[in-house]
Amino acid sequence: MFTTTTLAALAAVALSACASHMGAPAMSFSQASLPAAVQVPAGHQVAMETVGVGQITYECRAKKDMAGHEWVFVGPDAKLMDRMGRPVGKYYGPPATWESNDGSKLTGAQVAVAPAAAGSIPLQLVKANPAMGMGAMQGVTYIQRVATQGGVAPAMPCDGSKAGMKQIVNYQADYILWKAA
């Protein structure tokens, strides 16, 4: 004969088993903790959350004022994956281009940046240009680069003897794509 405690325990086990098959509710990106400069304006909703993993190329070039040399950002090359780790596209440049596996793609113009953790490229807000091709990128209005890891210019010196030398650094960032609501 079962006691009330035993029945309650069995019920809890049964409910947790059912819940595990139902899956957890989808997490939705919140920009509440982001600096105001890189927040998407009201009236937009998340269209896609991606994780970009790849490299950024830098080149040692003369400074614009010709007083020395510096590492200059050349461009990114990253795979875009969904939150489950499935490939959904790529990010490359120049110009900065987000391309879906369905062939649709877009470019954009930087609106703002904000500091990230030490050793990581800044957070960024990009205003998207109209997409080319039909698909996932159609209707995207903004792209946020958040949760950045790595990607900063090389620490090694850049001087005249290294002019033209390229260095590739690894990075990861979340790219959140938004559409008008």
Image (cartoon, rainbow, N blue to C red):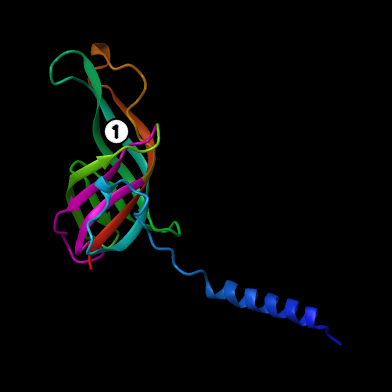
- Seen in the image, is 71 located left or right of residue 83? left
Q: 49 and 124: which one is in front? A: 124
- Seen in the image, is 155 located left or right of residue 159? right
The image position of residue 6, as x and y in percent, is 79, 79
Queried whether the magenta region covers residue 78, the answer comes back as no
> Disc 1 on helix, strand or loop?
strand
Image quarter in which the N terminus is found? bottom right
Q: Quadrant of residue 104?
A: bottom left
- Seen in the image, is 92 located left or right of residue 171? left
Looking at the picture, does residue 93 appear above or below residue 142?
A: above
Q: What stretch is highlighted in magenta?
A: 119-146
Q: How crowded is mark 1: few (under 14 residues within 10 Å), some or many (20 or more)?
A: many
Identify the residue at image location x=34%, y=48%: 34
The image position of residue 48, as x and y in percent, is 32, 61
Identify the residue at image location x=58%, y=74%: 19
Q: 33 and 14: which one is in front? A: 33
The residue beneath circle 1 is 57
The image position of residue 70, as x and y in percent, is 24, 21
The kind of residue on which mark 1 rests is Thr
Q: In which quarter of the image is residue 152?
A: top left
Queried whether the magenta region covers residue 120, the answer comes back as yes
Looking at the picture, does residue 49 appear above or below residue 155?
A: below
